[in-house]
Image (cartoon, rainbow, N blue to C red):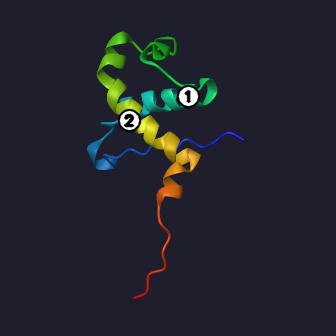
Amino acid sequence: MTPTIRIIDIAGKKQGHRFEPYQRMANAIIERALNNGGCTEQDLLAQGFTKQETRDLWHMSHAMASIELKLMSGEAARKIKSEAQYA
């Protein structure tokens, strides 16, 4: 079963496509991590990213990908305490 990648544009539509380059790289990082167990900046060069793009976008994209991978693995859901709350 192939997991669904759900990178969200945190800027929203009013801000345009400000995070689109980060999302594109984060998706590549996720794909590489799922297929090969990890991803480095050098791996992205083989996927068509330039050295300048990897320098400029790596940190934010890697953070976005890391969050998404944790959500996909259910790690984040296990850490949330489930409690009944009454009004």
Residue that sits furthest to the bottom in the current view: 87
- Counting other residues with Cα less than 10 Å from the Cα at mark 1, is it few (<14), some (14-19), or many (20 or more)? some
What residue sits 45% from the left and 31% below the top? Answer: 26
**Which residue does the image show at 56% across and 50% down from the upper left?**
74
In this rendered view, identify the residue nearer to me: 63 or 82. Answer: 82
Name the kind of residue labelled 2 in the image: Ala
Q: Is residue 28 left or right of residue 60?
A: right
Disc nearer the start of the sequence (2/1) = 1
Between 77 and 55, the one nearer to me in the picture: 77
Figure check: 14 above or below 28: below
Q: Which residue is mark 1?
A: 33
What quarter of the picture does the C terminus occupy?
A: bottom left
Residue furthest to the left in view is 15
Q: Residues within 10 Å of mark 2 (few under 14, many from 20)?
A: few
**Residue pictured at 50% horizontal, 70% vertical:** 82
Question: Which residue: 49% across, 79% down?
Answer: 84
Q: Work out whether 87 lies above or below 21.
A: below
Q: Secondary structure at mark 1?
A: helix
